[in-house]
Image: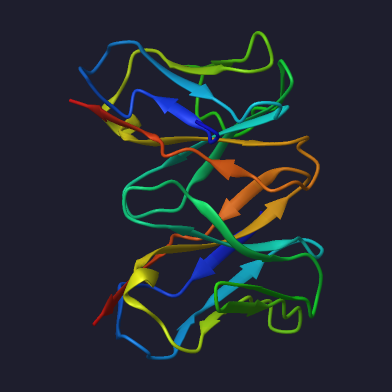
Amino acid sequence: GAGVSQTPSNKVTEKGKYVELRCDPISGHTALYWYRQSLGQGPEFLIYFQGTGAADDSGLPNDRFFAVRPEGSVSTLKIQRTERGDSAVYLCASSLTGNGNTIYFGEGSWLTVV
Amino acid sequence: GNSVTQMEGPVTLSEEAFLTINCTYTATGYPSLFWYVQYPGEGLQLLLKATKADDKGSNKGFEATYRKETTSFHLEKGSVQVSDSAVYFCALIEGAQKLVFGQGTRLTINP
């Protein structure tokens, strides 16, 4: 498709397990973002990639969270030793160059930690 | 830090009613302001934006004016439709790329 694609759309995992969430941005978009949206709240910024490098990771809550974008396209958000408080919708977004262009969001990955 | 505060929801209106969803912000300088919308089962979509004071963003009959005097960016529509039912998020951009969102306002339009 032409939009931002995220997989899985839903993930249920046990506390303490490791989780990977994948994002496929719009083709040609160099800027990629991860946000987290808890129930009843607005999205909160996690990390921003420009190409392969993380230009701003100030929103990652702690060192259990890590994200990569090795080839400057697909990105993976990795969460180690998941906790119940990690349950949220994880949103990926992309924009053409990351310089004031419109930011397009995917539908999100719902993560539930039980 | 920068923040956005939105009118609490949920908001329920009848079709053809006038809509206002209030949004105020706290920011250093004059960031660009946005309204995003999330329809049921879909991702966040940009509805409209304004990049400087007194700018008016508009799209699909919705409007919002960037008011630096009152640090506000209220969303309005003159006549809502059932298809406008969604969650609406006000946001500002911090630095070059970081969106800061309000908590969202759920809007339901009854026929």
Q: Is residue B79 left or right of residue A49?
A: left
**Front-most of A3 and B24?**
A3
Q: Is residue A47 above or below residue B34?
A: above
Q: Residue at x 78, y 76 (%)?
A: B55
**Front-most of B9 and B41?**
B41
Percent x, y of residue B42: 39, 48
Q: Is residue B11 above or below residue A11?
A: below
Q: Is residue B29 left or right of residue A56?
A: right
Q: Is residue B101 left or right of residue B33?
A: left
Percent x, y of residue A42: 45, 53
Q: Residue at x 55, y 72 (%)?
A: B60
Q: Is residue B75 above or below residue A34?
A: below
Percent x, y of residue A13: 23, 19
According to the image, what is the colour scheme of the structure? rainbow
Percent x, y of residue B37: 47, 60
Q: Residue at x 72, y 43 (%)?
A: B97
